[in-house]
């Protein structure tokens, strides 16, 4: 990892913004919050920001629970300058799910594989189950005890992104879970983990079940209406739980385009690479070995033709077939 003092030096004397991906989930929110509070210890104040929507109940519950302010880009754009410092957290510039803000992206702290390389003045990109683990390690190495809210948020983000330590877990995730546990509020953590599904989510589950198609070990389902990013990911996890499925692909057809989530239990199929390859030239995609995400903007959807569901299927099956040779 890079030296935290280098990041602090880059930020001192400048307006600082901590930017997550466009649809921040609990891991992104926790990581941004944890970094914000850590920088405050060194006299650096930073605003949390994003573009897109807070569209998952678990994410909005976090903001309410910890009284966090995440500012939409539309409320910042007129006040930002090219020299302002931007720290990308749980995302990477040009990653496909992050808007290019006015300002200088001087730093990146992320746990996803890099598909579009970018030069940063400070970079800490390591493959872990959760970005929250990276931020927790900063506290541990600096000898700074995280505030109770910070520890609770980071632990929740860690558990959510690793599906309770069952997905993409590394040794660092396990160590940081133990580290954060001693400082967190167990009652608040339990409250965050309860009741994270809304009644309207059931419609999406029904559509995903009704439309699933199996191709050998590949399960593909297209939902013909808008689902939040996080719900698309949950549906992919749900389909992956089928004993017949080792790779799950879920697409939600929304007003802004098509959102995809991909999951893989096959060690020979990298979900992020599969998504990147399948959508290359028409959309963007990437992610980890076990989970990937992609997006096709509404202005490109017409390129899928009159039968977009079938075309999406062919793109992914074609990418899978090409990967076997």
Image (cartoon, rainbow, N blue to C red):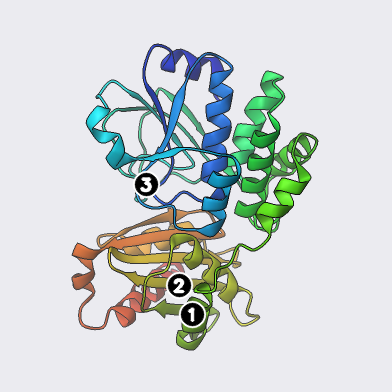
Give the percent coordinates (x, y) of residue 269. Answer: 52, 64
Q: Residues within 10 Å of mark 2 (few under 14, many from 20)?
A: many
Residue 66, quarter of picture: top right
User: Which element is circle 2 on?
Assistant: strand
Q: Is residue 177 above or below residue 52?
A: above
Residue position for label 1: 203
Residue at 61%, 82% in the rendered image: 244
Residue position for label 3: 95
Do the residues under discs 1 and 3 have CB atoms within 8 angstroms? no
From the viewer's perspective, tell me whether residue 87 is left or right of residue 303.
Answer: right
User: Which element is circle 3 on?
Assistant: loop
The residues bearing labels 2 and 3 have C-alpha atoms spaced at a distance of 20 Å
From the viewer's perspective, tell me whether residue 241 is left or right of residue 82.
Answer: right
- Which image quadrant: the N terminus? top right
Do the residues under discs 2 and 3 have CB atoms within 8 angstroms? no
Q: Residues within 10 Å of mark 3 (few under 14, many from 20)?
A: many
Give the percent coordinates (x, y) of residue 201. Answer: 51, 73
Mark whose residue sits in front, 1 or 2: 1
Give the percent coordinates (x, y) of residue 138. Answer: 63, 26
Q: Residues within 10 Å of mark 1 (few under 14, many from 20)?
A: few
User: Which element is circle 1 on?
Assistant: helix
Which labelled disc corresponds to residue 250? 2
């Amino acid at each position: 990892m890079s030296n935290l003092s280098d990041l602090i030096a880059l930020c001192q004397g400048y307006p600082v913004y901590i930017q997550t991906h466009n649809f921040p989930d609990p891991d992104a929110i926790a990581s941004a919050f944890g970094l914000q509070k850590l920088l405050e210890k060194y006299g650096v104040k930073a605003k949390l920001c994003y573009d897109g929507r807070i569209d998952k109940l678990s994410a909005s519950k976090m903001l309410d629970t910890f009284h966090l302010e995440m500012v939409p880009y539309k409320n910042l754009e007129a006040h930002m300058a090219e020299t302002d410092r931007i720290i990308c957290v749980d995302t990477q510039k040009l990653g496909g799910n992050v808007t290019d803000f006015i300002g200088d992206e001087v730093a990146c702290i992320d746990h996803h594989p890099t598909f579009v390389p970018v030069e940063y003045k400070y970079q800490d990109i390591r493959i872990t189950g959760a970005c929250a683990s990276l931020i927790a390690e900063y506290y541990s190495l600096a000898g700074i005890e995280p505030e109770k809210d910070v520890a609770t948020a980071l632990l929740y983000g860690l558990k959510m992104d690793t599906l309770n330590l069952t997905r993409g877990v590394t040794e660092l995730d396990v160590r940081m879970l133990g580290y954060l546990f001693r400082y967190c509020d167990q009652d608040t953590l339990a409250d965050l983990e309860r009741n994270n599904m809304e009644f309207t989510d059931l419609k999406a589950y029904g559509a995903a079940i009704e439309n699933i198609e199996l191709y050998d070990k590949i399960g593909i389902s297209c939902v013909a209406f808008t689902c939040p990013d996080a719900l698309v990911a949950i549906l992919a996890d749900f389909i992956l739980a089928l004993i017949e499925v080792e790779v799950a692909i879920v697409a939600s057809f929304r007003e802004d385009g098509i959102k995809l989530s991909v999951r893989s239990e096959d060690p020979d199929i990298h979900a992020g690479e599969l998504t990147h390859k399948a959508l290359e030239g028409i959309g963007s995609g990437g992610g980890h070995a076990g989970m990937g995400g992609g997006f096709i903007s509404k202005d490109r959807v017409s390129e899928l033709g009159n039968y977009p569901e079938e075309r999406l299927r062919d793109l992914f099956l074609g990418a899978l077939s090409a990967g076997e040779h």
